[in-house]
Every structure is written in C-alpha cells, then in structure tokens.
Image (tube, helix red, strand yellow):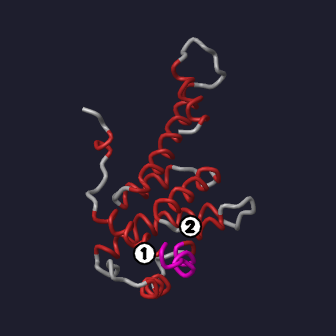
Amino acid sequence: MSLFDDRIFGLTIDENDDTGISQEDLSEVILASYERNQLLRLCDKRVTPSLVKYYINEIDNEDEIFWEKMLRRLVNVYFLFNLRLFLTEIRISSFEEHVIDFVKDIKINIPQDIVERKITKDTTRDELEDLLMGDKKYKTFLKWSIKFIDRESYERFLKQIIKISKMTFYSEEDDEEY
C-alpha cells in the first residue's frame, strides 16, 4: 500500500475532521485504491480471466503510475527483466495500453495455452516465440520480451508461468482470516 493509500484510509477513521472531501468521493478513491492493490497482489496467483478483466476494467487506464508499478511487479514475478527498458522516464506511446495487454497475455492467454498443452515445460524459446508471433491474441510486450530474453531468464519464466498455471484458482476468501 502506498503512502497516498494510507492517507486516504486515515481520512475515514477521523470522522470529526473536516477534510473537504465528500464521503462519496472518498469512498470512490478508497475503492479504486483497493482494486489497484488487489490487481498487484494477483500477479503471482492463478486467477480466472473474468477476475483479471474485472480489475482491468475498474482501474483507470490513464493511471500511469499504477501501470508502471504493475509492469515492475510482473517483470519481477516472471523474470522478464528485459522489459525494464520500458520503465524509464521516457515513455513509449500508449504505455498503459501495452501494459494492460501484457497483463492479459500473462494472466489469461499464456495460462490458457498451458491448459491446452500448446506450452509445456519442454517448450523451447524458439517454439514459444513462434507461437506468440503466429497468434494475434498476443501483444507487443510479451512478444518482444520472449524474442530478446536470455536463456536463464527464459527457463525461470517458463518454470514460473507453469507453476502458477498449475495452482488452484485464487479466491478472495483465501485472504480472510478465520
């Protein structure tokens, strides 16, 4: 959670303080913050496509800071370190849309192809690159990353993506303490 999120949550605690923000606006900001944090937390979990799509649709596409955080998180979870090139002060056009497409590729499309056995633990980098290039559902960031990935990172990526794809589906009840 960021400092901004902590400050917003703190505003709900002190009901006697006049913050100048309406409760409706505050609730909207809190919900948006929760949804951003949830999507970040789902990076290393197996989730249903509908849950990924829900959070993507709820998060503002113009929130460049969030989408940068999301890309950083995915780069670290999936060992796609060559994508750090896109985490500079100079942004490519449509950065947010590229990251959203990347999230869909990593959390929806790749797991689907693993279930369909198009991708296995024995899939070589060249075979995966051919699959990605030949399938229009895959977008720029993933294609570029696999094309220029080193062998060690590829092996770690493949192992991680298969491991996560074999997990049971995440449920929000998993977070509740009994």
**Residue 124 place in picture, x, y as percent:** 41, 85
The numbered dot on residue 36 is none
Q: Is residue 149 one of those drawn in magenta?
A: yes
Disc 1 element: helix
Q: Is 77 on the left or on the right of 26, as rendered?
A: left
Residue 81 location, quadrant = bottom right
The kind of secondary structure the magenta stretch mainly shows is helix
Residue that extends furthest to the front in the rendered view of this protein:
152
Q: Is residue 155 one of those drawn in magenta?
A: no
Label whose residue precedes the other's in the sequence (2 or 1)? 2
Q: The magenta stretch spans which residues?
A: 142-153
Q: Quadrant of the C terminus?
A: top left
Residue carrying label 2:
81
**Residue 48 place in picture, x, y as percent:** 33, 59
Q: Is 55 on the left or on the right of 7, as rendered?
A: left
Relative vertical location of residue 32 with respect to residue 123 in this rendering, above or below: above
* Distance between the alpha carbons at the discs numbered 2 and 1: 13 Å
Residue carrying label 1:
155
Q: Residue at x 44, y 70 (%)?
A: 157
Disc 2 element: helix
Residue 165 location, quadrant = bottom left
**Residue 68 place in picture, x, y as percent:** 61, 56
Relative vertical location of residue 71 with respect to residue 129 in this rendering, above or below: above
Q: Residue at x 28, y 56 (%)?
A: 169
Disc 2 packing (10 Å; few <14; some 14–19; many ≥20): some
Q: Residue at x 38, y 54 (%)?
A: 51
Residue type, label 2 = Phe
Residue type, label 1 = Glu
